[in-house]
Amino acid sequence: MTTMFGNRLRAGAALIAVLAATPALAEETVEAAAESADVAEIVVLGRGEARQVQELGAADIALEVAGVSPLKAIDKLPGVNFTSADPFGAYEWSARISIRGFSQNQLGFTLDGIPLGDMNYGNHNGLHISRAIIGENVGRVEVAQGAGSLGAASTSNLGGTIEFFSREPGEAFGVEASGTYGSDDNKRAFVRVDSGELFAGGTRLSLSYAWQDADKWKGEGVQRQHQVNARLVQPVGDGRFFGFVNYSDRRENDYQDMSADMIGRLGYDWDNYAKDWDLAVRVAQIYQNQVSQSGAAGTPLPYPDAGLVFPAPIATVDDAYYDAAGLRRDWLAGAGVEAPLGEYWTFKATGYYHGNEGRGLWFTPYVTTPGGAPITIRTTEYEIERYGILASSLFEVGANSFEIGMWYEDNDFNQARRFYGLADTAGAPSRSSLDFPADPLATQWAFDFNTQTLQYHVQDRLDLGSFRLNAGWKGLRVTNNATPIVSGGLASGRTEAKDWFLPQAGLLYRLNDDNELFASYTENMRAFESSATGGPFATTQAGFDALDLKPETSTTWELGFRTKSPRFQGVIAGYYVDFKDRIIAFANGSGIQGNPAILQNVGDVRSWGVEAAGTFRVTPELALFASYAYNDSEYRDDVVNAAGAVVAATAGKTVVNSPKHLAKGEITWDNGDFFARVGANYTSKRYYSYENDAEVGGFLIVDASIGYRFTDRISIQANATNLFDKAYVSTIGTNGFANSGDAQTLLAGAPQQFFVTVKAGF
């Protein structure tokens, strides 16, 4: 192993040395290419990059409904599949993004370089972008569908990498504010103050606040959030110091997870019993009566007045629960420096902190309160304390841009499953779903997890005029330790994922000023997850000990072509991905029961596909944008047990939640005063069982916006989401995926919604 590592490292160093020795020519950056383009781009198509990459700016995001997640804004990019059960894309239990068949926990996410983890609901190593920063403060979003930048601070970016960048404090004093009202009593307010230069020397500060309160579109419940963002920049010579503090307090009620059977029996508008506490109690009593009858014959019913039959149309105890909610409180802060240390050397370093307290609550009829209601509140509790540092040095000599960098993080994560009692009351429960509960009845399990991450990277970019070469590698080691406080039958122990040489190479060939070819090769590895609800510790100790623990790895090849003209800019790319040691978590019972997952290394996955996107400027005011992606992702092996018997016949089956076709189109009009946009998004069918015997159909959703600018700082804008009121299944896999058959793991998409936003500033 040592010899192999040494040979690979020497090979990488030799490649860098060859590039570094080549004479210089001027470099044309992506930003400069975009600025010099004859067409005003709706989407920056990565011109000048040796990989498939696109970028969206703040102006494009601003055309979405206020409060939208930036993830929903990038859904129109080729190969990107985003789903959510709310119109904003911010409801975290439902928010899912996948790229080229890779799920959310196999992608990488950063904000101004700071890692956001895998952004999954369980939040073990980061936080969702909707909490990390206010949407109006996102300056741009860069999406790399396959080969993310080597310096991206992520241990999960097997597939694409999504990097968010915040708006800088303005150079002049200014105030901007907006207010939104819309469907389901949605209310939102945003205000931002930019100080401009506070005094000689250029110190600049921005301070923002956002508040949102919206009812759910079905059932009873709310989405509420308070956010504060503060950012400081202090220029020093040709460099600068910077710092920021972001705070979020988010509390939202959940929608009821559905199955195909439930949708057929109960309809898309079925939801939890919230506000009908007495019905929830009655259903729980009937369920407990049914459980008693499954025991010894003649056992008396614990609730004889309730009987044994659920009231119509309820068929099972899992058809609905009283209520559920997600509570998240986050602090994200950082400080750093960017400074030239000479004519050819630039140094950058950032230290950061993230603290999180979170709860996921379900009112469960499976566990009763002794002497109280036949229901308890079941929580999954999260506490994160993570610290990290990012540092890099860039050396620019002639045609070479040579960079070395590192990232270190120490993450302490406490996770627990607890139950809280409810009094035997009528009319309403004795606890609110939107408050952090206290005084638990019992702790089912509790763990302290510690994750140590060390990553470095080395890369060189060489510009030879017609040719640009990129080459480098990163090394990564992640150690996970799980220490039980209350084991509850779950696994504990230690895992490590390590590879000190993960290469990446790219080639850009400029055919002429308007056309270019690009190709790239990338190797990546995903570290193990430190969590009791995901990854290798989410199973029993016996299952953990028997698991073939190899980190998931991917190898990606890309080949593409870009073109531009005074009216048109476009890109087309093909890719092939070899994904090894795929670890699958098989769901075990309904989600509310919280049974340990059944984990298995299912071998390899193969993906290939084609992506295309283009912008056509019909007139200076009218522009068209379209993208299409075809993706074929399939499992290469059957799942077998230790005896070699087939557990799941997955060989040749399509990867779950992996649509083969994604087509997006958009028409925009802007004459400076009046502006409008209509966008359509088609997603083909998706499977939600590993053996592909359960699927949801394809759907086409149309969104629209229209507005008028009274001045350059005052405007009014109206947005419509799901304009034609399509009933459809949006998110799948909320409670994981089963081996075969129907499962309660679907969420209905939001119906037609309307919103009006007024913006003003000076």
Image (tube, rainbow, N blue to C red):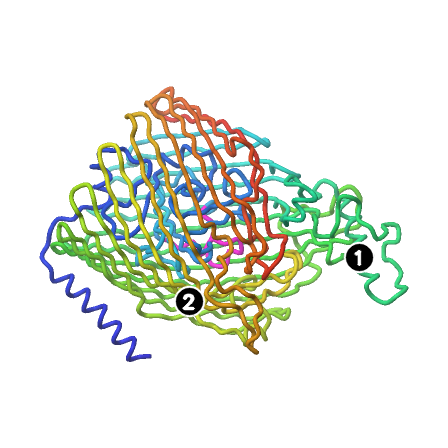
Residue at the spot 17% in from the left edge and 56% down from the top edge: 462
* 401 sits left or right of 719 in the view: left
- Secondary structure at badge 1 equals helix
Which range is magenta?
114-129
Question: Which quarter of the picture shows residue 178?
Answer: top left
Amino acid under disc 1: Gln
Name the quarter where the C terminus is drawn.
top left
Q: Is residue 236 visible?
A: yes
- The residue wearing badge 1 is 288
Residue at the spot 24% in from the left edge and 57% down from the top edge: 506
Expressed as whole percent of the image width and height from the top left, the position of residue 306 reads: 85, 50
Q: Earlier in the sequence, mark 2 or mark 1?
A: 1
Instruction: Select label 2 or label 1 by which is in front.
Output: 2
Expressed as whole percent of the image width and height from the top left, the position of residue 566 reads: 22, 33
Name the quarter where the N terminus is drawn.
bottom left
Amino acid under disc 2: Lys
Question: Which quarter of the picture shows residue 649?
Answer: bottom right
Expressed as whole percent of the image width and height from the top left, the position of residue 62 reads: 40, 34
Give the camera-side residue of 739 and 595: 739
User: Residue farthest to the left?
Assistant: 23
- Disc 2 from disc 1: Cα separation: 45 Å
Give the camera-side residue of 591 and 633: 633
- The residue wearing badge 2 is 580
Task: Give yes or no for contact between labels 2 and 1 (Cβ–Cβ under 8 Å).
Answer: no
- Secondary structure at badge 2 equals strand
Residue at the spot 18% in from the left edge and 55% down from the top edge: 341
Q: Is residue 237 visible?
A: no
Answer whether residue 124 is magenta in the image.
yes
Considering the whole magenta stretch, tell me its main secondary structure: loop
